[in-house]
Image (cartoon, rainbow, N blue to C red):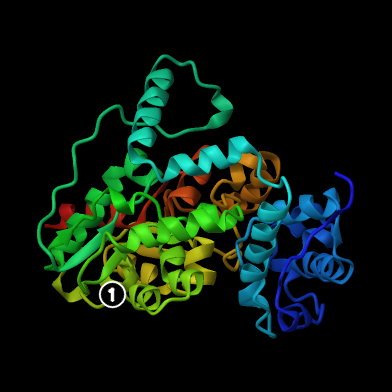
Amino acid sequence: MKKVAVKLGIDSEDLASCVSCGLCLPHCPTYRVTQEESASPRGRIALMRQAESTGLIDQTFVDFMDACIQCRGCETACPAGVPFGSMMETTREALTQQTSYQSWWRRWGYRVLGCPNILTIGSRALAVLQRLKLLPSKLALPKIPLMQAPLVPSGEDVWLFTGCVMDVWMRDTHRATQRVIEAAGAGVRFPDKKAACCGALHVHAGLGEEARRLARRTMSAFPGDAPILVDSAGCGAQMKEYGHLLNTSDAHKFSQRVLDVHEWLVNHLDELPAAHANPPRIAIQDPCHLRHVQQAHDPVRVVLARYADPVILDDEGLCCGAGGAYSALYPDTAAAVRERKIESINRAQVHEVASANPGCLLHLQAGGVRVRHPLEIVDDLMRKDI
């Protein structure tokens, strides 16, 4: 790509808020793998400043922006509160609108996520190919179900968001979540197909208009004022930011109804069956969008601790490398980041890991880690104790 004119549109105060102190560097997975300054948060911000100053970008700029996992660990570490996540989202949307940053095939792939019928048909086709052993092993996909029974509502106390890929590949996780919620005394209601996708991956890809369309459609699928529980960290983070994304009063009100399911459960633990002795030791992998965006990782530990002995990893919540679609687009970097996580898991000396995000879960499974959603573990242990 030759140098092209682009206006990023990032707030000048946000650009100036980074003082290049470097405290973010140990928390940036791409910097830790590459040791390249431009692959760090402060390096990427320096490139953004240069682009805003000159009005020009080149392929190097695009490559470094695209190679960010968007884990937002830098935000937690930053003493100045630099809003790196929103700056990256603004940059990618500007690139998408003003350049050929997103190819047609990427756009098509993201579009499919919001089309449940096409996604279901495609998943079934993958399931058939998987059983015929015709899929490349490097894809490291989970066992995809051929057919799935529908989720059955049990009341109207809370909603449970089901999403896109998680619903067609991991519906059993939703069933386990539903059983735990019901054991806490609440009836569960499910949205219709208008809530087919939250738009998180679209925001990450700079497809802002499509993300806003999906957000408005998702909001319309949850009438009333009942809490909206989410068992996917990435989806929950996105839905909590609908107010920022759409900047309407309805979106802000909607976001206030959204809770990670563990946030809701910590207030209903006394209703769950009592646990028995000899709890298993379970390591907890904090998904980035639960720890750094929602800041709701502690409730996972509290809920899991009712039935297990939770073990906190010693890597200070470093990203596992999944990053939504990142592990598919940058498999080598994602695998290198994952290796650091696996080393931490091995040091913990546990037989199983809990992860509250489907992307992290699948990425860790592909690396040979025995990992399940926390509420699958709770559901299993809870029913054994009854």
Residue 173 appears at what percent x and percent y? 30, 48
Which image quadrant for residue 257?
bottom left
In the picture of the structure, the residue carrying the numbered disc 1 is 266
- The image shows residue 26, relative to residue 232, as above or below, that is below
Residue placed most toward the observer, 69 or 57: 57
Could one spot residue 140 in this view of the protein?
A: yes
Quadrant (top left/top right/bottom left/bottom right) for the N terminus: top right
Which image quadrant for residue 228?
bottom left
At 74% from the left and 67% from the top, the residue drawn is 41
In this rendering, position of residue 156 left or right of residue 174: left
Residue 142 appears at what percent x and percent y? 43, 34
At 69% from the left and 60% from the top, the residue drawn is 94
Quadrant (top left/top right/bottom left/bottom right) for the C terminus: bottom left
Residue placed most toward the observer, 332 or 160: 160
Could one spot residue 297 in this view of the protein?
A: no
At 61% from the left and 67% from the top, the residue drawn is 72
Which image quadrant for residue 31?
bottom right
In this rendering, position of residue 279 left or right of residue 288: left
